[in-house]
């Protein structure tokens, strides 16, 4: 649940800032790979009073959590369903906009996902996706243990069929999916103040030992429990260093046509 907890703090104001100016009521939006729904619910509020949002995710557990969050916040113009972006079973040209945040990096066939997104998007609609590029990560102070973290994360991601450096490929994936009009921007995730350092360091100290990354790393023979414990401790020590700093880039693409 450490991954879900990290995802639950995400907001549309940050994660969807690149596309929010394009969204308004009464648009109907699809958020695929919505996770616990924190961004989805923000999008639903953004397209009030007449717009609506559908969030889909392959995990029934996080969909139930998203539904609970919608009830807690009293947001009624949103639906959450278990579903696959490869085959949503949704009607063609039924959404004004399709959105995804940090989803394609985990997929073995991101182009097929974008083709499905394009199918359910209206001809004058848009598809907006944001993806990280782990290959751009800069960490200070840097040491071998944090270098091992980057190696373990990337090797596990690729063994799972994903692409940890998805950001650099994102525009090309849109082109391969048939989008003829793309707008590409970049931004960064930067952690330097005390709150940011604690959040980033603590979550990775936990996730490297308790999430599916740990399970897969051990299963694939990429790392053992001692390695993961060492990496976890490195994050704890890193966050308290006076000059601690972390940054990597995010690529954002809006596709039309």
Image: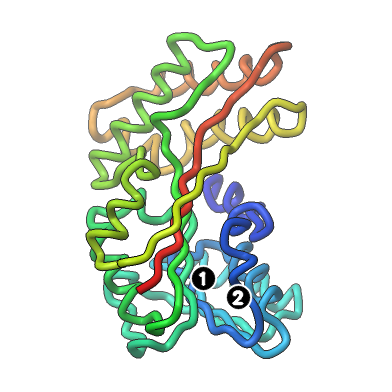
Using the image, tell me which numbered label, if any, was put on residue 182: none
On the rendered structure, is 218 left or right of 80? left
240 over 248 or under it: above or below: above
Q: Measuring from the top left, give residue 170's x and y in whole percent.
A: 35, 50
Do labels 1 and 2 touch, CB within 8 Å? yes
Q: Quadrant of the C terminus?
A: bottom left
Q: Measuring from the top left, give residue 143's x and y in whole percent.
A: 49, 9
Q: Measuring from the top left, give residue 107's x and y in whole percent.
A: 30, 54
Q: Nearer the viewer, residue 238 or 175?
A: 175
Q: Nearer the viewer, residue 42 or 210?
A: 42
Q: Nearer the viewer, residue 144 or 171?
A: 171
Q: Nearer the viewer, residue 207 or 242?
A: 242
Q: Measuring from the top left, give residue 137's x and y in whole percent.
A: 47, 27
Task: Return the residue at label 2.
Answer: 67
* Residue for point 60% across, 75% down: 67
Residue farthest to the front, as pictured = 181
Q: How many marks?
A: 2
Q: Residues within 10 Å of mark 2 (few under 14, many from 20)?
A: many
**Corner quadrant of residue 26:** bottom right
**Corner quadrant of residue 88:** bottom left
**Corner quadrant of residue 205:** top right
**Helix, strand or loop under label 1:** helix
How does the figure colour the protein chain or chains? rainbow
206 over 151 or under it: above or below: below
On the rendered structure, is 236 left or right of 101? right
On the rendered structure, is 209 left or right of 187? left
Using the image, tell me which numbered label, if any, was put on residue 63: 1
On the rendered structure, is 242 left or right of 90? right
């Amino acid at each position: 649940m450490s991954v879900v907890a990290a995802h639950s703090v995400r907001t549309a104001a940050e994660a969807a800032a690149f596309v929010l100016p394009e969204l308004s009521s009464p648009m109907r939006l699809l958020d695929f790979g919505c996770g616990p729904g924190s961004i989805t619910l923000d999008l639903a509020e953004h397209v009030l009073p007449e717009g609506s949002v559908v969030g889909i995710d392959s995990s029934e557990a996080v969909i139930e959590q998203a539904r609970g969050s919608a009830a807690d916040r009293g947001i009624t113009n949103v639906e959450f369903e278990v579903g696959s972006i490869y085959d949503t079973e949704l009607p063609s040209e039924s959404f004004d906009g399709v959105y995804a945040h940090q989803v394609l990096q985990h997929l073995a066939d991101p182009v097929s996902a974008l083709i499905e997104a394009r199918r359910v998007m209206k001809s004058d609609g848009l598809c907006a996706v944001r993806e990280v590029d782990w290959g751009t990560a800069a960490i200070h102070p840097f040491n071998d243990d944090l270098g091992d973290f980057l190696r373990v994360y990337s090797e596990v991601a690729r063994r799972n069929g994903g692409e940890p450096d998805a950001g650099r490929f994102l525009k090309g994936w849109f082109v391969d999916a048939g989008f003829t009009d793309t707008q590409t921007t970049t931004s960064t995730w930067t952690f330097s103040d005390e709150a940011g350092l604690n959040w980033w360091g603590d979550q990775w100290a936990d996730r490297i030992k308790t999430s599916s990354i740990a399970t897969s790393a051990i299963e694939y023979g990429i790392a053992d429990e001692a390695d993961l414990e060492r990496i976890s401790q490195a994050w704890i020590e890193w966050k308290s260093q006076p000059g601690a700093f972390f940054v990597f880039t995010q690529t954002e693409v809006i596709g039309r046509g």
